[in-house]
Image (tube, helix red, strand yellow):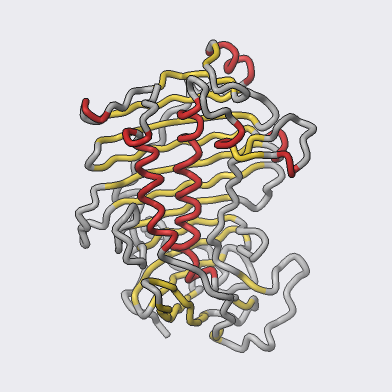
């Protein structure tokens, strides 16, 4: 079990490290921008094609524990507040979602400059440019963003993605530049809109000046599928230091979140692997929205003075925060004993594609 002292919890340290990032990068309103082609007279798209695209900043994770199958939406609490604070394993349950929620909030700030742009849809929209506002150190900074929708080799496997080359048909490729510098490569397999992030893969560089968690020029990857929230969701985040721009912040991690089933009865799993100067820690947690059982496993490699300890397939009653026999989580279908930890990112899983010119082609 993890220590009760919050100063000695790696997960709580990670949560605290995120706070300066998302407080230091705030949003502005949407930006219409300028499309390459004539955005005023694009061909009329099919009804299921949206009128505009929005690069996501909120990837739709919902860390809730519904209070009973018949509970109304207003009765649902985040898992952090659903479990009593004084149970034997309450801290472990709270930590398991705390740091993920902080990461989600931080990511909103990091992705906001891209999300501000309202990208028109049309078969003749091959490029796009606009200006986003980033609030930092008490003053607004303006960032010019350019997007090229031409197909490219996202995976560095020698084959270009089968993208449409425009914004009216899937898949949609994007190579995104900020102030003339390449930042993100993306392939969307479902339309990202203001109301639904859709599905896609993104790899890029952090453009903020934060020295916490996302060091400037560190690699960031996001793989997600939220196109049908009613049946399931999956999101994974990866961060590793850019060896060409070492920051001194020795931190890399991989976080994944999976949801199976509709929200009121969803089976939810968090899986993470992080390593840094403090050591390393892996964890996997699972719970079901209409059940009172939570299962967790944590493995820690850290100095003895850290006070951190492991959690061995612990079953917990969410109504009390106290431990239960593992068989109860096995019977409830939430036991994590057979789930392997996700792996840390490396140069083969997180990078900027070679097929990404250093400067915008337009």
Please name the residue shown 54% across and 79% down the image.
126
The picture quadrant where one finds residue 20 is bottom left
On the picture, is 298 further left or further right than 81? left
On the picture, is 111 further left or further right than 291? left
Q: Residue furthest front?
A: 86
Above or below, 269 against 133 in this view is above
Q: In which quarter of the image is the C terminus?
A: bottom left
Seen from the viewer's position, the closer of residues 57 and 191 is: 57
- The percent coordinates of residue 196 (x first, y second) are 65, 59
- The percent coordinates of residue 42 (x first, y second) are 68, 83
Q: Is residue 233 visible?
A: yes
Please name the residue shown 51% across and 80% down the image.
127
Seen from the viewer's position, the closer of residues 119 and 304 is: 304
Counting every numbered tag in the picture gives 0
Q: Is residue 143 visible?
A: no
- The percent coordinates of residue 341 (x first, y second) are 41, 31
Above or below, 262 against 213 in this view is above
Q: In which quarter of the image is the N terminus?
A: top left
Please name the residue shown 50% across and 34% down the image.
94
- The percent coordinates of residue 278 (x first, y second) are 24, 38
Above or below, 251 against 45 in this view is above
Seen from the viewer's position, the closer of residues 140 and 290 is: 140
Please name the residue shown 56% across and 25% down the image.
294
């Amino acid at each position: 079990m993890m220590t009760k002292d919050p100063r000695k919890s790696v997960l709580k340290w990670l949560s605290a490290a995120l706070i300066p990032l998302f407080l230091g990068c705030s949003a502005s309103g949407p930006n219409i921008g300028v499309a390459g082609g004539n955005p005023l007279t694009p061909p009329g798209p099919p009804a299921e094609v949206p009128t505009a695209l929005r690069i996501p900043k909120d990837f739709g994770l919902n860390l809730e524990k519904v209070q009973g199958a018949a509970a109304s939406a207003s009765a649902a609490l985040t898992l952090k507040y659903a479990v009593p604070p004084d149970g034997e394993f309450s801290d472990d349950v709270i930590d398991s979602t705390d740091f993920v929620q902080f990461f989600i909030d931080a990511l909103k700030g990091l992705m906001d400059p891209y999300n501000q742009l309202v990208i028109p849809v049309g078969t003749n929209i091959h490029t796009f440019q606009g200006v986003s506002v980033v609030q930092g150190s008490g003053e607004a900074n303006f960032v010019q963003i350019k997007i090229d929708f031409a197909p490219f080799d996202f995976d560095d496997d020698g084959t270009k993605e089968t993208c449409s080359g425009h914004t009216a048909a899937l898949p949609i490729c994007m190579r995104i530049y900020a102030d003339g510098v390449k930042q993100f490569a993306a392939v969307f397999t479902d339309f990202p809109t203001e109301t639904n992030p859709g599905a896609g893969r993104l790899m890029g560089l952090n453009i903020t000046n934060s020295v916490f968690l996302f060091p400037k020029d560190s690699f960031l990857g996001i793989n997600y599928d939220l196109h049908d929230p009613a049946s399931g969701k999956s999101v994974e985040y990866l961060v590793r230091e850019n060896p060409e721009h070492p920051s001194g912040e020795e931190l890399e991690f991989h976080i994944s979140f999976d949801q199976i089933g509709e929200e009121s009865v969803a089976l939810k799993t968090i899986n993470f692997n992080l390593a840094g100067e403090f050591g390393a820690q892996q964890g996997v947690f699972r719970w079901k929205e209409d059940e009172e059982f939570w299962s967790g496993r944590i493995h820690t490699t850290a100095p003895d003075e850290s006070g951190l300890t492991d959690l061995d397939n612990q079953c917990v009653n969410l109504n009390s925060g106290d431990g239960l026999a593992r068989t109860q989580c096995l019977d409830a279908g939430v036991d994590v004993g057979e789930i392997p930890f996700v792996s840390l990112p490396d140069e083969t899983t997180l990078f900027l594609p070679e097929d990404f010119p250093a400067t915008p082609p337009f």
